[in-house]
Amino acid sequence: MRSEAEIRTRLRSFVRRRAGDRPVSDSTPLLADRILRSVHVPELILLLERLRGAPIDVERLRPGDFDSIDAIVERFGPAS
Amino acid sequence: MNRLADLTRIGLRWDPSGLAGLTGPLLAVADDLDLAFRRLAGRWRAVEERYPAALPAPPLADHLRCFPHQVTFPVALDPADDNLGEFADGPVVGADGRVALTRTAPVTAVLTPAACYHVYAGHRGERLTGARYLTTRNTCFRRETRYLALRRQWSFAMREIVCLGTPDEAASFLAVARADVDQLAALIDLPLAWTPATDPFFRPADNPGYLLQRIAPTKYEATYDGRLAVGSANLHHDHFGTAFDIERDGRPATSACVAFGIERWLYALTDRHGTDPAGWPDLPAAATRVVAGWPR
């Protein structure tokens, strides 16, 4: 499991590559603002699995889990 | 209580292969249901559109990948004389009920999986300066592993109301439509609850659409008595706007739809109110009361 700071850094990089010229913060609603779309979700899950060093059971995903970088870290970060 | 024998007595003509016919009181109430839903569609002055039973396959490639287990294709014989002759001179239909097909023509269409798909294809390339509201009804086809009369059918009727607009217009449409359905259900004493749902994707764990529905629900089902989805409210974001080049003020249109499964409403009505038509609520009148309350 990487540190929270490392996970945030990697997530910001992942999101910014897909955000184009739109500004993104850790609280930006990624799905509601259509910065991330369905095609990005499997990639994001793979990235999180690498950062966590553990698989993610998609049947346990819940609404809100990927709402923002903050939400992702809270759900899948070191403190989860 | 709506056992098959009781439903047959009031007009169900059920074939266990998943096909239902309606006649008599059940047909009359099915027509009343459709009229009630069209009255609800009147809130948005939704324009009625009518489409055929099948639609061309190419724009549905994504759907075919996501739901190959549910799709039904219209198949025709290769029209060459020798091929048609071989078919006509053969057993045609075997003792097991299987059609003894000879060579088939290329399959290029899909039997309607959802009524609203036609609407997006029918508005391809449009440049909208305001929200558009459409309503349509079609016979839809979905293969299942087992069939239950009125509840889970291979072929069934679906009425839909569709919004093409901005994200805010689509969200507002869904909120209002759900409230109207709630009010209609209350007036006819049908216990309905909206619950988040996912579509039955093939290999769901590998499907981006399924994963997105789990983390950001875009589909809510109106569930009768906690056990049967009789309708759904769906937000497609700009999926169809992009796929069919429909723009609203220069951006891919957002689409949303509310769908009603007519046979499932018949099941719910007869389960709740019995199979004696004298005990059934006046559906068009209830819809008129909903309409009369606008704007709330």
Image: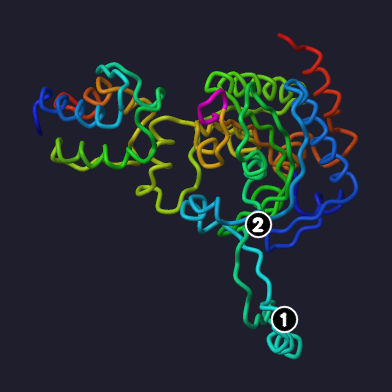
Residue at mark 1:
B93
Give coordinates of residue B76: x percent, y percent. Answer: 68, 72
B238 or B154, nearer to the observer: B238
The CA span between labels 2 and 1 is: 22 Å
Q: How crowded is mark 2: few (under 14 residues within 10 Å), some or many (20 or more)?
A: many
Up-down relation of residue B247 to residue B67 (above or below) = above
Give coordinates of residue B237: x percent, y percent. Answer: 50, 31
Rendering quarter of residue B269? top right
- Is residue B253 rendered magenta in the image? yes
Query: Helix or strand or loop: what does disc 2 sit on?
Result: strand
Bounds of the magenta segment: B248-254
Residue at mark 2:
B111
B113 or B204, nearer to the observer: B113
Amino acid type shown at disc 1: Val
Considering the image in quadrants, where does the C terminus of chain B appear? top right
B10 or B58, nearer to the observer: B58
Give left or right: position of B121 versus B201.
right
Q: Which of marks 2 and 1 is nearer the N terminus?
A: 1
Up-down relation of residue B86 to residue B101 (above or below) = below
